[in-house]
Amino acid sequence: MRQETAETGATPRERYRAQVRAEIKDHARRQIATAGAPGLSLNAIAKRMGMSGPALYRYYAGRDELLTDLVRDAYRSLAEDFRAASAPAPDARALAHALRAWALADPQRYFLTFGTPVPGYEAPEDTTVLAREVMTLMLDACAALPPAGSPGGPFAAHLEEHREWTGGHPAPPAVLHRALTLWTRLHGALSLELAGHFAGMGFDPALLYEAELDALTGDG
Amino acid sequence: MRQETAETGATPRERYRAQVRAEIKDHARRQIATAGAPGLSLNAIAKRMGMSGPALYRYYAGRDELLTDLVRDAYRSLAEDFRAASAPAPDARALAHALRAWALADPQRYFLTFGTPVPGYEAPEDTTVLAREVMTLMLDACAALPPAGSPGGPFAAHLEEHREWTGGHPAPPAVLHRALTLWTRLHGALSLELAGHFAGMGFDPALLYEAELDALTGDG
DNA sequence: TAACGACCGTGATAGCTTCTAACGAACGGC
DNA sequence: GCCGTTCGTTAGAAGCTATCACGGTCGTTA
């Protein structure tokens, strides 16, 4: 039978394994932060950890599995920041600022989750679950906003009949619409900024972001 | 001396060279459309063209140069579609629809221009010139819109002093703001749709796009 | 027409990558 | 103390970018 330690609930072997996996992820994070996802090299990680290339495959079946783990961590980290920004009460402005801070802290991490998808790579089921969790926090924040003057256009009516993605959230369609536009507009400004498309244009991206946020919280 | 043909103004050698380069680009386009930019392989292109790998280097110095050429073509193609949508008169709605059609026709081409940047790769000067051309058409379209009720917030005031990117466009700051939000909002909705982030959410991305467009042309 | 030079395609090579397979060593449970 | 699981190694296949040196071809020029 296996002997479990009190602290972690795992055998020493499993603890070692978990630690090595964490170390691998740490190197991968650093590597991705500077060279991006395509620059992630299992070989380089192994060498930097002082072991040979194939040894890594004892811990990760391949590049994709490592990337998936990083995506999972990224979503979890964003959800955590969102939860912190939602305390003591859901707040769309705080959420938006948390999102930008999270993105600027590690742009490649943002691209890993919301950037260009790798064609061959299929996101596993549980990442969409994590994404839904983030979405739920956005819905809560938008539900807490003062209701907009307009009752919502034809798209809000469309959303009334297609609310599978809300996970049973009781928000009215106008709030669903607001949450979606909050997401897409902030992502639009943020992703173009991070991708460097505003470079050399002269204006301050932070002010554009703030202007979008004003438009959203004032009247979507 | 070089002998120029009447039709193309180039020697037969140069015509052949241009034709081969075009064929390479064609294969690259097809390859990128299915496997994305990281899936672009010079070797595979060469083999599919019936020649050996290194032969390609006679026509393109490397992967980056080929990618740059594709980016250039993409911008040119978008600018062309925008010009067509701006006839007979600048029209923001027509422009937006042209953008979405252009993106859906080849999502990887969209990502090539507006997607996650490759960290090692630096876009050459002339692509920014092409991007400015696209931006100018957007500015023209926004200038032709009926003026918004609001005179513009603090960001519009900021833009008044930072209008280098307009290339001397005489539009008032409110129009500059509108053009920027047109770009970022449409990109936000479009890029998330193309990246598959709306998959399984149930609603129709086209309606979301249309709703954003309504919000923009009605009152930004 | 004959020769020269620019250009094109080839195979060989270096160095990198992911990933599989087979072997030896170390660790932990009984 | 034995024995099996697990770990790390080296070797190797297949792929990629990119460079080099060589031979063939084409166009021009003497």
Image: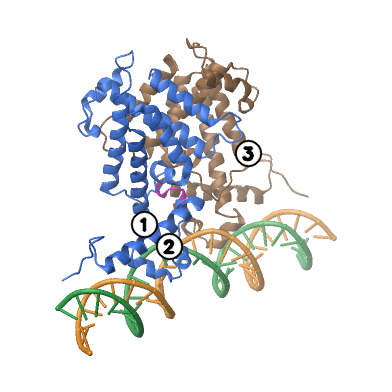
Chain colours: A blue, B brown, C green, D orange
The label on residue A42 is 2
- Dot 3 falls on a residue whose secondary structure is helix
- Please identify, in this view, whether the residue under mark 3 or under mark 2 is nearer the observer: 2
Residue at screen point 36% across, 57% down = A66
Q: Main secondary structure of the magenta part?
A: helix
Q: Position of residue B148 (x, y in %)?
A: 48, 12
Q: Residue under mark 1: which chain is it in?
A: A
Residue at screen point 35% across, 66% down = A57
Q: Residue under mark 2: which chain is it in?
A: A
Residue tagged 3 = B126
Q: Are marks 2 and 1 in contact (CB under 8 Å)?
A: yes
Identify which amino acid the numbered label 3 is placed on.
Answer: Asp
**Crowding near pointer 1: few (<14 within 10 Å), some, many (20+)?**
some
Q: Which residues are magenta?
A: B34-38
Q: Quadrant of residue D19?
A: bottom right
- Please identify, in this view, whether the residue under mark 1 or under mark 3 is nearer the observer: 1
**Crowding near pointer 3: few (<14 within 10 Å), some, many (20+)?**
few
Residue at screen point 23% across, 28% down = A162
Q: Quadrant of residue B162?
A: top right
Q: Residue B35: say if magenta.
A: yes
Towards the viewer: B122 or A25: A25
Towards the viewer: A11 or A34: A11
Asked if residue C3 is positioned above or below residue B161 in the image, the reply reads below
Residue at screen point 65% across, 23% down = B168
Q: Position of residue B79 (x, y in %)?
A: 54, 30
Residue tagged 1 = A66
Q: Residue under mark 3: which chain is it in?
A: B
Asked if residue A191 is positioned above or below residue A40 in the image, the reply reads above
